[in-house]
Amino acid sequence: MPSLTDGAIRRAIKQVEKSGKQADLADGEGRGTGRLVLVLKAMPTRVTAEWMAQQWSDGKRTKKKIGSYPSTSLAGARELFQRDFANLIQKGRSIKIATDTRPGTVGDLFEAYVENLRENGKSSWKEAEKGLNKVADTLGRNRLAREIEPDEVANVIRPIYERGARVMADHVRSYVRSAYSWGMKSEHDYRNSSPRRFRLAYNPAAGIPTEPKNVGTRWLDEDEYVRLYRWLECPDTPVHPPYPRAIRILMLTGQRVEEIARLHVDQWDAAEEIIDWSKTKNSRPHAIPVPALAAELINSLKPNKFGWFFPSANDPSVPVSHNTLYSFIWRQRERGVIPVVTNRDLRRTWKTLAGKAGVTKEIRDRIQNHALHDVSSKNYDRWNYMPEKRAGMKKWDKFITALLTKGQNRKAA
């Protein structure tokens, strides 16, 4: 059978449109093994034209879609067939396992990695996408991922570091390293449906050193705690109202800032006074009873129409980001109106003061959803510890209520 031409395709489409009957146009010979076929189908308003790779094996026919005509041209379809299907057919392997055999580009790798984060419910996917998009633009989005050298990654990070953004530089290094690490593992992962294989021989960011981590030790003493809490109740400067409320909830519950920032109406059980997260940083479900002060505060808040307790000032359809809350605190402490503190310091403060209130470390760990690494906790213990958490929160509520009352009385005097 002669090869197809664009003229023959156009004539066949008109014929199918008139007859209403399906037509299969084969490109060249090869019925005994496999070939490229254009399948024409009459629809109510148009004729669809789909390129298919067709294979014959043991008297049975198998088809796999390549693209649509004319968006995929005749020449393009032939190229795709030869590149991804012809070799499989020649070897007698099924075309069902065929994939795009071109090595993936930098853009392909980064996009697939971000999609993997998103599909697995990782809240970091947006930050990773933003960072990797900038890296891809610098390295060259259409370059093969396997061609990137370590010095090229270092040259992307160095200007960020030299302008003083050392934490951001380390984040960028981490994004690139993680994307390449994922790409190398995905090469032979049967669970991965990415259309590209990257053929990575090494991770170009693996040898780039990290910025030394400063392990925080700062926590607020009782006077500092009261000072910050009272300022958040009545700021001396115009601020977006949800922001100081979110920080007060952080102070009262000791939770991670991103979990409080993203607090949604579906997660709050007002009757039981419980916050219930289905997904957290350590990928484990987490629920806590809140102290009476926090319950009163949450119940006084009106979620916006999107269900967020703490919506972003710029886009109410999304919650405030943890970075925005960090910046909010940073600006106020630079003014000297509140103690020097970070959001993580607040989590450390809760841990410390709740211990002083008499809450055992085990229950404090469980309330703060710290990972427990012993075999019993990881693999066997499925008790939710809600009664024990409630008892712990009652102790904390009594302690913090007395502390804030004492601070208020001292101020009045």
Image (spheres, rainbow, N blue to C red):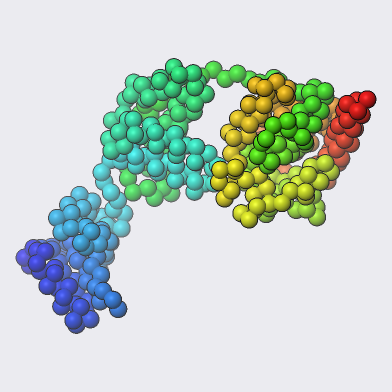
Location of residue 274 in the rendering, given as x and y in whole percent from the top left corner: 76, 49
The residue positioned 77% from the left and 48% from the top of the image is 300
* Residue toward you, 50 or 273: 273
Count the marks. Answer: 0
Q: Residue furthest left?
A: 2
Tell me: 380 left or right of 65.
right
Tell me: 227 left or right of 109.
right
Q: Is residue 144 visible?
A: no
**161 lies above or below 359:** above
The residue positioned 25% from the left and 58% from the top of the image is 66
Quadrant holding the N terminus: bottom left
Location of residue 362 in the rendering, given as x and y in whole percent from the top left corner: 78, 33
Tell me: 237 left or right of 123.
right
Tell me: 66 left or right of 377.
left
Location of residue 383 in the rendering, given as x and y in whole percent from the top left corner: 75, 46
In the rendered image, which quarter is residue 78 located in? Answer: bottom left
* Residue toward you, 336 or 386: 336
